[in-house]
Image (cartoon, helix red, strand yellow):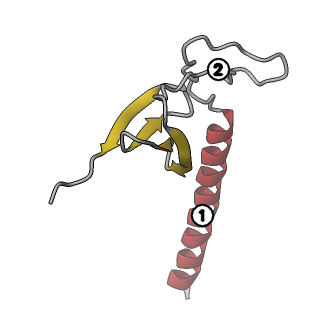
Amino acid sequence: MKALKALVIGMGVLIIVGLALVGYGLSNNSLRKPPPAVAGGGAVPLSGEPAGRAYYSVEVPVTAGNHLEQMAVSGDKVLLRFAGSEGDRILVVDPQTGHLSGTISLVPQKP
């Protein structure tokens, strides 16, 4: 009977210690500041925006005869598909910075 009583007390102490650790972890995460945002070229903070957020303007190079066919979001990137006389092209843009991350040219395969 003494062993059972010691076991119940031990498990109660473990539960209390576990809850204290969970509370500490939650409070520690809520006090942590987010990493500073990387502003894109020519970023201008808006007056109503929270610190770290910035408005930016990005010029996407589009050749004559091409037009924006489709836009999609994939993870942390924005994909812009342009169609035109020279073939399709996909631009990969980072929405956090506004920088062009890459270009994919879709070239038709010759038979």
Percent position of residue 28, x then y: 62, 38
Report the mark closest to the observer, 2 or 1: 2
Disc 2 residue type?
Tyr
Dot 2 or dot 1: first in sequence order is 1
- Residue nearest the viewer, comparing 41 with 39: 41
Quadrant occupied by the C terminus: bottom left
Disc 1 residue type?
Val
Can you identify the residue that label 1 sits on?
13
Residue at the image position 60 percent from the left and 63 percent from the top: 13
Can you identify the residue that label 2 sits on?
56
Number of labelled discs?
A: 2
Q: Secondary structure at mark 2?
A: loop
Percent position of residue 65, x then y: 49, 35
Percent position of residue 32, x then y: 62, 32
> Where on the picture, by quarter, is residue 18?
bottom right
> Where on the picture, by quarter, is residue 33?
top right
Percent position of residue 82, x then y: 48, 42
- Residue nearest the viewer, comparing 73 with 27: 73
Left or right: 46 as drawn, with respect to 69: right
- Residue nearest the viewer, comparing 110 with 56: 110
In the rendered image of this protein, does residue 55 appear above or below residue 10?
above
